[in-house]
Image (cartoon, rainbow, N blue to C red):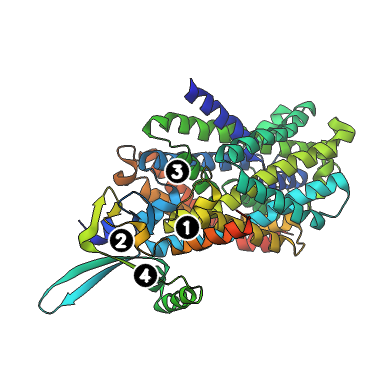
Amino acid sequence: MKRIANVILGVVTSIGGFAEAGSLSTSLQAGAEFGFALLWTIPLAALMLAMLLEMSGRLSALSGRTYAAAVRDRFGAHVQCGMLVVELLLDLLLLTAELGGVAVAVELVTGVAFHWWLVPVAIAAGMLLWLGTFAVIEDGLGLLGLVTLVFAVVAWRLHPAMPQIAAGLLPSKPTHDAASYAFIAVSIVGATVSPYLLNFYASGAVEEEWTERDLWSNRITSFAGIGFGALVSVAALVCAALVLAPQHVKVDSLEQAASVLNPILHSWGVPLFALALGIGCFGAAVEIALNAGYVAAQGFGWTWGANKHRLETARFSVAMTLMLIAGLIVAAFGFNPMRVTLISVGIAVIFMPIVVLPLLVLMNDDRFVKSHRNGPIGNAALALLVILGALLAVVVVPLQVIGGG
Amino acid sequence: MELVRDVLDKLVVDRHGHAMGRIDAIVLEWRDGAAPLVRSVAIGPVPLAHRLHPRLGYLVGRLERWLELSERRPIQVPFSKVDVKEMRVMVNVTAGETGSNNVELALRAFLRRLTWK
């Protein structure tokens, strides 16, 4: 019974934790510029992410190792240090975007410019990192994140035409601005398949001491949680397509999308948009900083764990705090958080094959996954993902220049 | 046992199960006309950085000395005290008798001062 309750909690918190600066920005931009035409990218990206999370969860449950630790064990110091640099760089950019997202959310409610809120937001994130257990951070923020379901409620109340939605779920040629269409499509993949999620999910599995008996719950949590979570992105895109596109609003900043809920929620629209954006980004910011501590500690063999006292895991605690401070410093330069988000998802796409490729080897090594190796379908899907990631990595920079605005 | 596959880069714990880091290098002794002898395993940022690039190893070593963290480091444990099980290495010493906790303890002391504990 306890396991079933844990699975339900895992699925619910996955839904609440899905939306953050990257997924919301790209979905809103896609809907505002191309209506329902880019809808197909969200389920595709969600399927990729669910597959990767299921594999990293399986790896942890069977080997007792996180992804970062397994990479060091299997591939040695050079690969681990290379991946660590890549992951920390990505985490830094994503963290900057998320901190900016929270600060913009507070600006929308208070009217005080977002850069004034960066330090208080970082302090709040730091306090949660230092005082919270893994359950508080993961489940607490995931449950609060259910406020992002406001997009689903509004999308439903806007009565979208189902045939149009069904047509959007099939890839189609763009009617205008093909470069921008392709760029946003790639950005949605990059925003959804965030590399940090692989190790964060695996670390959660080790924190919660998953074993072989948890494999079924891992499968349900990853596929159902991400599947339902993706509905929030779908709903945000639908809202933008029905509200922003007819007004020819081009979403260049998060503030421009703030009115997306107004037709249904009226004066509550902007505050609830801000609340959803703020909680989603805050949760992601805390998780990203925590993940920086995880990858460093696991790679170098330090004592780690969000459930341990922070003074007992000093190197781990300092690593995540330094990441938070670094994110704050970059964010303090006052870049447009949406621009940072789009740059970070572009870079995430470039490095995605490098981050994912070792997983293909690990999931076929019985020293790590025992008899639960990937089958031909899993391997084919993962190989396809690596190839697709490599192709996207090649096109993302030209697309960012031509279609990124 | 295959040294690179089973020992190098693996997590290492002391005889009480306390984490000491990872095996960052293996020290071999070259002997004329005989197979090399595995003398010890090395743990710590200096051997790790040296593996990545000798210049980096030199710089990390200088940083460690500047921060006064170099006492009993780099940690070298005789290979006779090394036991390998399921990709984990156990060494028959205690972490405290080596310098493996120098950075952790220094940071703990710093954090305690910072948090008035």
Judging depth in this view, the residue of A292 and A100 nearest the camera is A292
Tag 2 residue: B8
Residue A318: percent from left, percent from top: 56, 58
Judging depth in this view, the residue of A310 and B32 nearest the camera is A310
- Residue at image coords 68%, 57%: A96
Is the same chain shared between marks 4 and 1? no
* Amino acid on which disc 2 is placed: Leu
**Above or below, A288 relative to A347:** above
Q: Secondary structure at mark 1?
A: helix
**Circles 2 and 3: CB distance less than 8 Å?**
no
**Circles 1 and 3: CB distance less than 8 Å?**
no
- The image's mark for residue B74 is 4
* Amino acid on which disc 1 is placed: Ile
Q: Quadrant of residue A160?
A: top right
Q: Earlier in the sequence, mark 4 or mark 2?
A: 2
Q: Nearer the viewer, mark 2 or mark 3?
A: 2
